[in-house]
Image: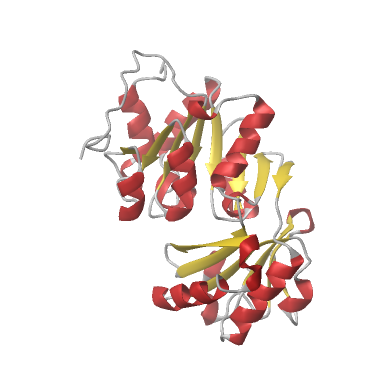
Amino acid sequence: MDIISHSHKFPKLDGLLPFHTIAMDLDGTLLDSRASISSLNHYVLQTALDQGVGLIIATGRRFSSALPYAQEFRGNVTVVANNGQVLRSSPSGERISETYISENATYAVLSLGKKKGHSPLLHVDRFEEGIDILIESPITDEKYHNYSGGDIARTKLVGDLLEHSSDRALVVCYLSLIKEELIELEKELLSLPESFEYRTVITKIPGVSYCLEVLEKGVSKWTAIQSYLKISGLGEAGVISFGDELNDREMLYSSGYGFAMKNAVPILKEGASYITKYSNNEDGIAMTLLELSVLSFR
């Protein structure tokens, strides 16, 4: 497959840099199957950063999980975490913007999920306190399918999540090895009276399970990127983005140059303007930027 989709032709760039910002998903995009940034991806992106191009890591992960990857780069990197609910800077961790799910919506979503026998995880915005996730059982419990690698460091056990629905809620997560179970739960969640306040997305977390996330309606990776662009005085057309899952859809479809990865889910590739020749295990981001011939290397 060519670097572009068959129905779109990438413009001739004539050696000019057509973008000011590179936005990229982590898992399945910047990271390879070993959850690492390859040396080539790092070199090319560091070169872009050194030449004044902004780097944005846009992920469904919590900020503390994405921060170590951002800190691999020398210089300021912006991190969109929790699928757009939080925007922070690296390496400082400084908060730029945040959006919370309302108390009523959080309560309704938690209540229904628990009633149906699911075990929710509640992501909260308490980074400075060392807390990211509230749960009712240890994160090492098999029902969480090794979520976050079973890391207990930034999780807090609580007796009843319903008592924490006002605790700066970012995302409610439900996990399952069976996607159909989450699709059924999603249908029920979207039938609640409070559903006008939130949206849902189902993704597959590599090495974990399928994940149903409930987020504030109108919030996405792209809306967080728009906040960054507004603060920076930059235009949307100057963003080149890369992603592989449905939570990257708004970002890819709204960017000036949105690339679905070769390994992206089919439905994302169907609507993307451009598709990379290379997968996340083939240095897809770096190879695409190199083939566009818009960066200077010494």
Residue 123, percent from left and from top = 66, 63
Query: Which residue is found at the position 71% from the left and 73% from the top?
Result: 107
Relative to 116, 248 lies left or right: left
Quadrant into which the C terminus falls: top left
Query: Which residue is found at the position 31% from the left and 18% from the top?
Result: 12
Quadrant into which the N terminus falls: top left
State the residue in front, 171 or 218: 218
Residue 77, percent from left and from top = 60, 35
Query: Which residue is found at the position 47% from the left and 24% from the top?
Result: 19
Residue 194, percent from left and from top = 66, 69
Q: Is residue 71 visible?
A: no
Task: Please count the marks in the image.
Answer: 0
Residue 271, percent from left and from top = 34, 46
The relative height of residue 19 versus residue 23 in the rendered view (above or below) is above
Query: Which residue is found at the position 41% from the left and 55% from the top?
Result: 34
Q: Is residue 179 visible?
A: yes
The relative height of residue 174 versus residue 267 in the rendered view (above or below) is below
What's the coloring here? secondary structure
State the residue in front, 278 or 1: 1
